[in-house]
Amino acid sequence: MKVRVFVTLKNGVLDPQGEAVGHALSALGFAGVNGVRQGKVIDLDLAGEDADAVRAEVTDMCEKLLANTVIENYEIELG
Amino acid sequence: MKVRVFVTLKNGVLDPQGEAVGHALSALGFAGVNGVRQGKVIDLDLAGEDADAVRAEVTDMCEKLLANTVIENYEIELG
């Protein structure tokens, strides 16, 4: 089963990478960019096919490795 | 308007970061991980509200800055 995990910085956590992208967009002439935040997307190809079991396993992966839950949020999308 | 852009490596392009995550998941005891690919997610907050115009602008941003279209694909999700 294909699973997509989004790992994004929590609100209030500084995001210099996102700010740099925002500045670069302005420098390229794109107006009206009010905010940019950059995160990670992790595409997993897992053996299991049971949605509930896969979701539980991926939640465990996020808590243990994929996200730093002090400063990052994660979302799991089964596909 | 909130826009989410996914930038992922094209198939066939080596992804050492994704491989490292895959090895780490195996080392943590997660079995059945057949593949891991890591990409970027960029959340934009843009001034425009017209979906077609925003999509065209974000496509332009991707081509010029956000993605390296030689090795990366991008997907745009208006939200």
Image (cartoon, coloured by chain):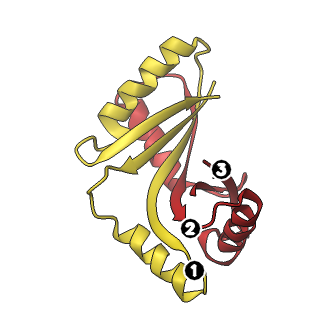
Chain colours: A yellow, B red
At horizontal 49% and vertical 13% (from top left) the residue drawn is A53
At horizontal 51% and vertical 57% (from top left) the residue drawn is B43
At horizontal 35% and vertical 42% (from top left) the residue drawn is A73
Q: Nearer the viewer, mark 2 or mark 3?
A: 2
**Label 1, residues with CA under 10 Å away: few <14, some 14-19, many ≥20:** few
Which element is circle 1 on?
loop
At horizontal 56% and vertical 67% (from top left) the residue drawn is B47
Estimate the x, y position of residue A76 in percent, counting from the top left. Answer: 49, 32
The image quadrant that residue A4 belongs to is top right
User: What chain letter is assigned to the residue under label 2?
Assistant: B
> Given contact means CB atoms under 8 Å apart, are the residues at marks 2 and 3 in contact?
no
**Label 2, residues with CA under 10 Å away: few <14, some 14-19, many ≥20:** some
Q: Is residue B62 left or right of residue B43?
A: right
Q: Nearer the viewer, mark 1 or mark 3?
A: 1
Mark number displayed over residue A31: 1
B19, above or below A48, in the image: below
Estimate the x, y position of residue B66 in percent, counting from the top left. Answer: 60, 70
Mark number displayed over residue B47: 2
Mark number displayed over residue B22: none
Q: Nearer the viewer, residue B33 or A53?
A: A53
Q: CA distance from mark 2 to mark 3?
A: 16 Å
Circle 3 sits on which residue?
B77
Estimate the x, y position of residue A57 in percent, counting from the top left. Answer: 43, 21
| Dot 2 amino acid type | Ala
Q: CA distance from mark 2 to mark 1?
A: 8 Å
Q: Nearer the viewer, residue A48 or A13?
A: A13
- The first of marks 2 and 3 along the sequence is 2
| Dot 1 amino acid type | Ala
> Given contact means CB atoms under 8 Å apart, are the residues at marks 2 and 1 in contact?
yes
Which element is circle 2 on?
loop
| Dot 3 amino acid type | Glu
